[in-house]
Image: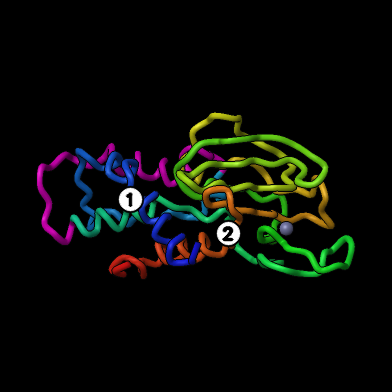
Amino acid sequence: MSKSGIVIALLLLLSGNHMKAQFNTVSFPCNRYKVAVENPAKTTNEKEATPEGVTSRILKSVPDKSSLPKTDKNKKEQVTRYLSVCYPLSHIKINSPYGYRKDPFTGKRKFHNGIDLYARSAKVFAMMKGKVLRVGQDKVSGKYVTLQHGNFTVSYCHLSQIFVSQGQAVLPGNVVGITGNTGRSTGEHLHMTIRHNGEYINPRIFLDYISSVKSGTYANRNI
Ligand SMILES: [Zn+2]
């Protein structure tokens, strides 16, 4: 599938029911609230630190209104969209990209089915709403978590700790585990793979998409 096809699939996924459900009956006077979802790893209270925690705090303090001026509606949509995604780590640095590379163990040319992100005992976040498809451990991936987001599955590998269990629902920003060096790994990092309908895709597409949502640059793009 082409990159634009995958992005369209992502958009369809994210424009689904959960985005509507969050703000069905509440207004969102953004002029009064600066909605900055800060680095969730900065606080110790995990629940409050997630974008969902931020959302629920704001919603509680806002009176209900039946209609909003158009500009407020647009802002509401922007905030909803902003909160619908989260980077997998607080700081993103790609150590090794997706695609063919020299295998760090054998030195031979081999397909790298994901990306390696720099990490040191870092919290790993769900990137969007979904559920835990699998939690496990094996010789290659070490401790891993696989999340399902619609037709996409995201695996986080070489973890040191796992905080979720199979079947559990996740929201963007929920902490699913801590990075580590378990399995076939030459040093601590987060190996992240993403499949779309079972086929590996470049996780950069997700990161770029999240980046565009967070910066608001994709908002008016017509695709
Ligand atoms: Zn890797």
Determine whether 15 is above or below 48 in the image: below
Residue 154 located left or right of residue 110: left
Q: Quadrant of the C terminus?
A: bottom left
Amino acid type of disc 2? Ile
At 52% from the left and 56% from the top, the residue drawn is 87
Residue 223 located left or right of residue 109: left
Mark yes or no: residue 188 visible: yes
Determine whether 170 is above or below 167 in the image: below
At 48% from the left and 44% from the top, the residue drawn is 149
Q: Which residue is mark 2?
A: 201
Viewer-proximal residue among 80 and 15: 15
Determine whether 53 is above or below 77 in the image: above
Viewer-proximal residue among 103 and 85: 103
- Tell me the distance, in whole angstroms, between the alpha carbons under discs 2 and 1: 21 Å
Q: Is residue 1 magenta?
A: no
In percent of width and height, residue 170 lies at 49, 38
At 27% from the left and 44% from the top, the residue drawn is 20
Q: Which residue is mark 1?
A: 15
